[in-house]
Amino acid sequence: MSSPDPISDPQGYQQHLLDLLGDDDPAEVQAATPARLRTLLDEVGDDLRALPEPGEWSVFGCLAHLADAEVVMSARYRWVLAQDEPPLVGYDQDLWVDHLHTEEPQESPESLLAVFEPLRRANVELWQRTPVESRSRVGQHAERGPESYDLAFRMIAGHDRFHMAQAERALAAVR
């Protein structure tokens, strides 16, 4: 099942990510992702950068995107909590992976985890200490319109599940 395009069907994309989360606790899902990534990286071996097919991300590409998304979400969460309806810029995930994570010199998965893990820990801790009433604060996403902290935090948990499954499929496809 493919996910809706985040630009052409923003509400479908939101719903797809929320469906992947289901009724699970978004903080628990997000807190478990770093260990899931490390387990996958222990298994991947020489297939880290192998593309399952042209135009698809490798396991490394999925990891790079998760790290990039965590950087973006770290800022968005804080803007929404600190400012009144701040603008939330969109970004082209493919351009970020293609331009920020080039093959030469090769970036290591450890360097990506060194960015992802502490940001993820800080973001989960921010969620846990944020009063429930503050979680309804809203930013104005450039492509999706009004988006609350609560919605964004739940979406990123579904996003984790989506891209972990993508990385697992990529690995299976190249083996």
Image (spheres, rainbow, N blue to C red):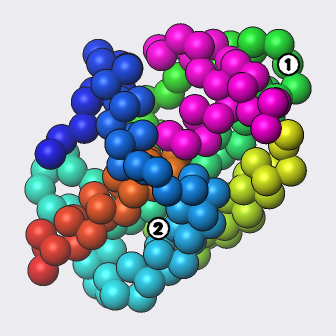
Tell me the quarter of the image containing the C terminus: bottom left
Labels 2, 1: front one: 1
Q: Seen in the image, is 122 located left or right of residue 44? A: right
In the image, residue 55 sits, relative to residue 109, either above or below, namely above
- Residue drawn at (55%, 43%), measured in percent from left and top? 154
In the rendered image, residue 138, in percent from the top left (x then y), is placed at 70, 19
In the rendered image, residue 60, in percent from the top left (x then y), is placed at 38, 65
Mark 2 and 1 residues: CB-CB less than 8 Å, in contact? no
Specify whether residue 89 is painted magenta. no
Tell me which segment is drawn in magenta.
Answer: 132-155
- Residue drawn at (53%, 62%), measured in percent from left and top? 29
Q: Is residue 104 visible in this depiction of the protein? A: no
Question: Three-letter amino acid code at disc 2?
Answer: Gln
Tell me the quarter of the image containing the N terminus: top left
Residue labelled with disc 1: 83
Label 1: which secondary element: loop
Looking at this rendering, what residue extends furthest in the front direction?
23
Residue 92, picture quadrant: top left
Crowd band around label 2 with a 10 angstrom C-alpha radius: few (<14), some (14–19), many (20+): few
Q: Report the disc number at residue 149.
A: none
In the rendered image, residue 173, in percent from the top left (x then y), is placed at 12, 69
In the image, residue 132 sits, relative to residue 70, either above or below, namely above
Residue labelled with disc 2: 106
Crowd band around label 1 with a 10 angstrom C-alpha radius: few (<14), some (14–19), many (20+): few
Return the residue nearer the eye: 26 or 80: 26
Of callouts 2 and 1, the N-terminal one: 1
Q: Seen in the image, is 87 located left or right of residue 59? A: right
Residue 73, picture quadrant: top right
